Image (cartoon, grey):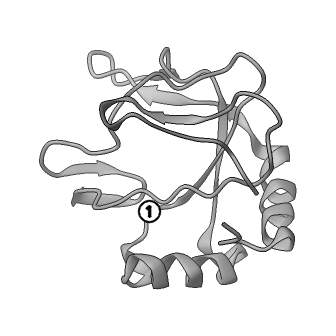
Amino acid sequence: DNFLTNEECDRLIAKSQPHLVPCLVKNDKTGIAEQDPVRTSTNTNVPQSEVPSIVEKMTNVANCCADQLEILQVLNYKKGQEFIPHTDGFSGKFDACGFEQASRQATIFCYLNDVAEGGSTNFPEIGLAIQPKK
């Protein structure tokens, strides 16, 4: 709770909203970026330089340096949108999010607003559902 201040949440929302686009993935067969069929939300990336206080908090909690963080990604879900169950890990090294031949060690979720109903992040393999809380 309260990992980010209200001001940091509001700043991220304000920086993100004008740049939100449908989530895309690279088609392995064609190499073309196309809308992700399993993630119906919109997203954008926010440069670390625009949110230094948030980057500092993330490096502290992850016990790493800023250059070890992926690009900050902001997702926006409207009613009925979803990201079906998936893993954030990859088998072996991959090229993505500004890194070459790297692997993701952890994912940090920060909810930028409260949601009165629905909107939970579910971890079905361990029976955990987390309700968004700013």
Q: Secondary structure at mark 1?
A: loop
Q: Residue lying farthest left?
A: 92
Q: Position of residue 76 (x, y in %)?
A: 71, 38
Q: Is 8 placed above or below 99 here?
A: below
Please give the name of the residue rendered at 81% of the width and 59% of the height, measured from the top-left corner. 15
Please give the name of the residue rendered at 79% of the width and 39% of the height, measured from the top-left corner. 115
Q: On the rendered structure, is 36 left or right of 101?
A: right
Q: On the rendered structure, is 42 left or right of 61?
A: right
Of residues 127 and 4, the one drawn nearer to the viewer in this rendering: 127
Q: Quadrant of the C terminus?
A: bottom right
Residue type at mark 1 is Glu
Give the class, few, some or many, for how many residues have Cα within 10 Å of label 1's Cα (few <14, many ≥20): some
Q: Residue lying farthest front?
A: 127
Count of marks, rendered view: 1
Q: Quadrant of the N terminus?
A: bottom right
Q: Position of residue 37 (x, y in %)?
A: 49, 14
Q: Is 113 placed above or below 128 here?
A: below
Q: Position of residue 98 (x, y in %)?
A: 41, 59
Of residues 91 and 25, the one drawn nearer to the viewer in this rendering: 91
Please give the name of the residue rendered at 72% of the width and 74% of the height, measured from the top-left corner. 50
Q: On the rendered structure, is 103 left or right of 62?
A: left
**In which quadrant of the rendered view does residue 107 lie?**
bottom left
Please give the name of the residue rendered at 71% of the width and 70% of the height, measured from the top-left corner. 2
**Which residue in the protein does label 1 denote?**
70
Q: Position of residue 112 (x, y in %)?
A: 75, 55
